[in-house]
Image (cartoon, grey):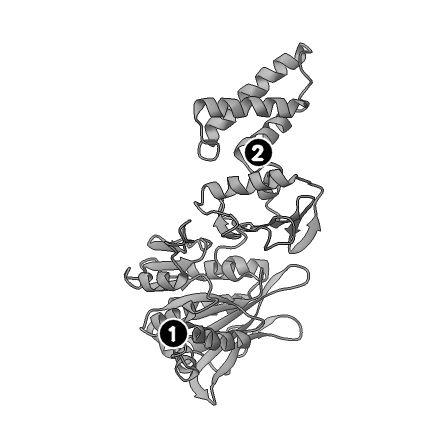
Amino acid sequence: MDALRIVEGEVRELIRLRGIDPLGQTGDVRRLVDAAVVDYDERALLGAVPSLGSLDAARKSLFDAVAGFGPLQPFLDDPSIEEIWLNAPTEIYVARNGESELTGVTLTEQQVRDLVERMLKSSGRRLDLSSPFVDASLPDGSRLHVAIPDVTRRHWAVNIRKFVVKASRLDHLVELGTLTPQSARFLAAAVAGGLNILVSGATQAGKTTMLNCLGASIGSRERVVTVEEIFELQFPLRDVVGLQCRQPNLEGTGEIPLRRLVKEALRMRPDRLVVGEVREAESLDMLIALNSGLPGMCSIHANSAQDAVTKLCTLPLLAGANISSSFVVPTVAACIDLVVHCTRRPNGRRQVTEILALGQRVENGIIETSSVFAVDGDGILRARPTGLPAVEKFERAGVDIFSLMETA
């Protein structure tokens, strides 16, 4: 047995005897690790046990093993890594700056199970044969998704999408090249004016980051209620209530879906409603809420801004046979003012490639739209103010949108 394994066993035994929660009492764990390393090093100097080597490295490795997530903890601590996924215990990948790479870390099947169990401990969510998928948040805000056999072919499939804070305001997106200064000012004015904004894009295109940055432009006196499947949104505001879905219990009851949360949110006196993402019938409840005069924002998976509009006109039909396009399409036209489409470039860079305005005119089941901003041949997001959205909302907020759009 090597030196680290010996000290790890001693630390785990001390944690058990003292009744310490490794995830909740990290300070106590760190003190135990420090004391155990010093004690072991003194014994090693006498030749009674093998040497630990670098004491700082040993402390880090031991702390990660008993209070962190073991061999995966260095990836979670690395700010340049955005995502971690396990296809098999010997196939562990990370995404760094938008590009994937295979790591040299290998685990055993039991280590993967133990790590997942530790990750789920603080979430209260479960994973078993009756519920082979799980979505949960880690203590640092990262999002965990796990699928197990026989849904997967052989191994547990684990995905950790880290909460890497690269931008929390629209100005930060300008610095990163996601937005131009003019488009950022336009979006800030749109949020201040209470326009309803739909953020679209593919997976990892930066939709959640965009929602967070848009949320930072909400007035400080507004009460915001957010509803999500898993907590991801973080607004730098005082009056924010976040709601997340709940899985059914072992008896198959107690589930709280997104549709229920949208309805409950309306009873909480919101000045603004933010839905993390719509995928199914909850889009109908969101549209009904926005149609009552409540400003809001939401994200949706789509290949383009126009596809996002089409998808939002289709998803509410999943709510039931009595919901028809003749109701949904005009409602989308009346509710949604802007679509902000995010794209991830091959080099990993995120960019807003189009800001689409929706008009209230509908012909042959198609909503009239126009590009307010679009990427030109040089790859730069430029203003195209052919049809500005909800001019009256800008005017109520005291914004001269025409002057704003003329600014170079």
Can residue 339 be seen by looking at this rendering? yes
Residue at horizontal 62 percent and vertical 13 percent from the top: 42
Quadrant position of residue 103: top right
Q: Observer-nearest residue: 371 or 266?
A: 266
Question: Of all residues shown, which one is farthest toward the top?
Answer: 46
Residue underneath mark 1: 394
- The percent coordinates of residue 263 (x first, y second) are 33, 64
Q: Observer-nearest residue: 222 or 294?
A: 294
- The percent coordinates of residue 246 (x first, y second) are 41, 54
Quadrant position of residue 20: top left
- Residue 218 in the figure: left or right of residue 73: left
Residue at horizontal 68 percent and vertical 53 percent from the top: 100
Residue underneath mark 2: 64
* Residue density around tag 1, few if under 14, some if 14–19, many if 20 or more, within 10 Å: many
Q: Kindly report which numbered mark, 1 or 2, lies closer to the viewer in this rendering.
A: 2
Residue at horizontal 41 percent and vertical 72 percent from the top: 319
Q: Is residue 186 above or below residue 240?
A: below
